[in-house]
Amino acid sequence: MRRMTILGLLMMLGWIPPCLAQQYELGGLGGYGWQGGLSAKTDTASADTGFRPGAAIGIMFGDNLYSQIGGEVRYLFRWSDLKVESGGQKATFNGESHIIHYDFLFHTRPTDSRTRPFFATGLGVKIFKGTGRERAFQPLSQFVLLTKATDVLPVISLGGGVKWSWRENIRIRVEIRDYWSPSPQKVLVPNPSARITGWVHDIVPMVGIAYTF
């Protein structure tokens, strides 16, 4: 029994250094993004549709799982007004989107490095919302109708950036993400004689600051 107790204590002590070395990050992000990739087509014509450029703000919580591999859950709010444009005409509609996702981060340098470039990839959901005021007539409705509705769709997150240790527990980060999601068919409603093709590519450069503990 005594030997088992000593062995158990040694095993517990063996786990203490990794636990102490494990670091978490909590921070905020801000940036500006561009969304493209969608078009509305009929048999005789086409229009660009999707979302206008807009600002982005968000929060993140990260866990450095290993020396060069980490995980991160994030929430990002996007100002995302809806649009459709063709032949010099255009229509817009107030909108927003919410992105919630989990990423794996692959760093090129270990946790204690002052500068840590990284690549990121993950999955989540993107919530598209039309928040404007609907009207009886909308230009270019022969292609798509911009509506006050909500779409919840899967999103793929790809990107990379650099973390820089500014002070002992403060990290600055610069990064860019490309969020891929299918075409939302409830906020961008295609005319019965039209179809929407493509995926939404939401490219967002961001700057952030995080507290590590």
Image: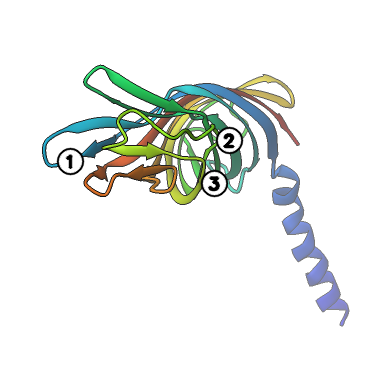
Nearer to the camera, 39 or 124: 39
Give the x, y percent position of residue 2: 88, 78
Give the x, y percent position of residue 171: 65, 24
Q: Residue at x 29, y 20 (%)?
A: 89
Sequence-first disc among 1 and 3: 1
Locate residue 18 relative to residue 7 in the image: left or right: left
| Residue 188 seen | yes
Three-letter code, disc 3: His
Q: CA distance from mark 1 to mark 2?
A: 34 Å
Mark 2, Cα crowd under 10 Å, few <14 / some 14-19 / many 20+, is: some
Nearer to the camera, 78 or 176: 78
Pointers 2 and 3 in contact (C-beta within 8 Å): no
Q: CA distance from mark 1 to mark 3?
A: 34 Å
Residue of label 1: 42
Residue of label 3: 101
Could you tell me which quadrant the N terminus lies in?
A: bottom right
Q: Secondary structure at mark 1?
A: loop
Give the x, y percent position of residue 31: 54, 21
Q: Is residue 19 above or below residue 108?
A: below
Nearer to the camera, 94 or 75: 94
Mark 3, Cα crowd under 10 Å, few <14 / some 14-19 / many 20+, is: many
Pointers 1 and 3 in contact (C-beta within 8 Å): no
Residue of label 2: 76
